[in-house]
Image (tube, helix red, strand yellow):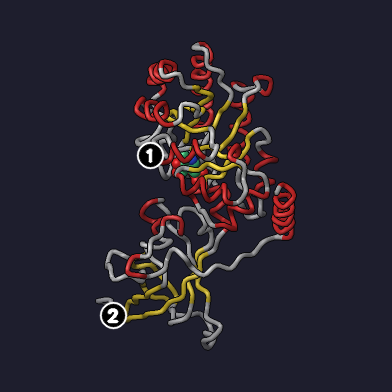
């Protein structure tokens, strides 16, 4: 994935959005491969710094930070952050006037699955006032960022955002700021096509074209992105055993099935509520049970999560082949905004599922080299 990114958009350095999946294996591998990190809280900064990553490889990409976040960044040498309000500028001036500031503008893809613009991003018309305030407070504005919305659908959102960013760069430069950083946010898919290629080509072509038009290499502007889903989504497969079964009449002479699985809306399937996902599933038969001969009968089935909350329903009335206790439902592409948002409601440890790592040889090489390089630095 990392190589595919670099080949497709060689000018854009990925700063992995750790919120998407802070799993240590994912973060450690990306650190070893040389990625930067988008951190949005002091806890995320701490996790990345604890791996030995230099603070210069972090952007504190939260436009509304708590005072404790800002103080932590100052004390730990994280020098770059985003803002989109005057109130944030005042906070930065109070707690860390040396913070280099990146103006986040609103640049929505209206069809993105998770739009972000209602909450974050200054309207471009607000930029002149914000830049003037930053200047009055003696702060250093060094660039522009945007996020078109997670799981973006319209590539044109990137090109029009890059064009808007150019206008704000020009305005900032004319006010005396030295605008050097363009941050094109996230929104990228990490899926593969049937030939195993990352489905990335059109996005990359659009972004490369807009960069060439508005931020050509000779402009000297550094370009970064904050991909989360792109790296994490396909990196994990979730397996949930069935541990409860119930038959009830379906009202027309047949039966319908209820099944309980070990993860639910309070766990990884919070992605259904917060990330608008509709997770695809496969049936995996338990090796401990007798094989099913021929094709299993199909029933209208409801899949319940493990908590006592009746709202904890993963799928209602879907068609599924007969399942038995100990069979599994398998959810591929379960790495983005899943376990990251889980909680342990009902005392069920959904934030710490059992993990099995599978690394390719090249990933292992990168990790070993990363460890050796770290050891040499110490
Ligand atoms: C500021 C910021 N950057 C990056 C991301 C990652 O976005 P994605 O997973 O779509 O790449 C998010 C997601 O919410 C975000 O809020």
Q: Is residue 209 left or right of residue 264?
A: right
| Residue 210 picture quarter | top right
User: Is 350 left or right of 159, judged from the image as shown?
Assistant: left
Residue located farthest toward the left when viewing the structure as drawn: 251
Q: Whole-Å distance between the Cαs marked 1 and 2?
A: 51 Å
Q: Which residue is mark 2?
A: 248
Element assignment for label 1: loop
Identify the image quadrant of residue 324: bottom left
Q: Nearer the viewer, residue 296 or 189?
A: 189
Q: Residue furthest bottom?
A: 290
- At label 1, counting other C-alpha atoms closer than 10 Å, the crowd grade (few under 14, some 14-19, many 20 or more) is some
Task: State which mark lies toward you, 1 or 2.
Answer: 1
Task: Name the element at disc 2.
Answer: strand
Q: Which one is nearer the viewer's eye here, 324 or 9?
A: 9
Q: Is residue 220 above or below residue 53?
A: above
The numbered dot on residue 66 is: 1
> Where 88 falls versus 23 (above or below)?
above
The quadrant where residue 68 appears:
top left
Q: Residues within 10 Å of mark 2 (few under 14, many from 20)?
A: few
Residue at point 53% right, 62% down? 332
Image coordinates of residue 294 in percent, x first then y, are: 53, 83
Q: Is residue 259 above or below residue 179?
A: below
Q: CB of mark 1 within 8 Å of CB of mark 2? A: no
Residue at the image position 60 percent from the left and 37 percent from the top: 56
Residue 264: x and y, percent? 38, 65
Q: Earlier in the sequence, mark 1 or mark 2?
A: 1
The circle on residue 21 is: none
Q: Nearer the viewer, residue 166 or 345?
A: 345
């Amino acid at each position: 994935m990392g190589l595919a990114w670099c080949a497709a958009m060689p000018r854009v350095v990925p700063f992995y959005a750790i919120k998407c999946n802070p799993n240590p294996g994912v973060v450690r591998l990306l650190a070893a491969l040389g990625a930067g990190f988008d951190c949005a809280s002091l806890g995320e900064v701490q996790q990345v710094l604890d791996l030995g990553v230099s603070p210069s490889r972090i952007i504190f990409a939260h436009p509304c930070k708590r005072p404790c976040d800002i103080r932590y960044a100052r004390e730990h040498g994280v020098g770059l952050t985003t803002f989109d309000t005057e109130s944030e500028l005042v906070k930065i001036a109070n707690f860390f006037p040396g913070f280099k500031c990146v103006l986040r503008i609103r640049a929505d893809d209206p069809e993105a699955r998770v739009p972000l613009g209602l909450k974050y991003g200054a309207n471009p018309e607000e930029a002149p006032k914000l830049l003037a305030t930053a200047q009055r407070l003696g702060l250093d504005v060094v660039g522009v960022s945007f996020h078109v919305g997670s799981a973006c659908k319209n590539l044109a959102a990137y090109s029009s955002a890059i064009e808007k960013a150019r206008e704000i760069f020009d305005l900032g430069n004319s006010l005396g700021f030295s605008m050097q950083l363009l941050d094109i946010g996230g929104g990228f898919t990490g899926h593969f096509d049937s030939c195993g290629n990352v489905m990335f080509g059109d996005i990359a072509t659009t972004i490369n074209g807009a960069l060439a038009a508005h931020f050509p290499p000779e402009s000297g502007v550094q370009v970064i992105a904050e991909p989360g889903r792109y790296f994490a989504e396909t990196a994990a497969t979730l397996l949930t055993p069935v541990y409860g079964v119930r038959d009830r009449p379906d009202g027309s002479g047949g039966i319908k099935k209820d099944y309980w699985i070990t993860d639910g809306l309070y766990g990884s399937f919070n992605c259904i509520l917060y990330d608008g996902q509709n997770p695809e599933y496969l049936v995996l038969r338990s090796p401990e049970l007798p094989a099913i001969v021929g094709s299993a009968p199909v029933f209208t089935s409801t899949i319940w999560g493990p908590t006592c909350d009746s709202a904890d329903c993963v799928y209602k009335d879907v068609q599924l082949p007969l399942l038995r206790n100990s069979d599994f439902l398998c959810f591929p592409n379960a790495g983005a905004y899943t376990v990251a948002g889980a909680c342990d409601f009902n005392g069920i440890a959904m934030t710490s599922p059992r993990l099995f790592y599978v690394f390719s040889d090249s990933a292992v090489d990168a990790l070993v080299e990363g460890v050796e390089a770290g050891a040499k630095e110490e």
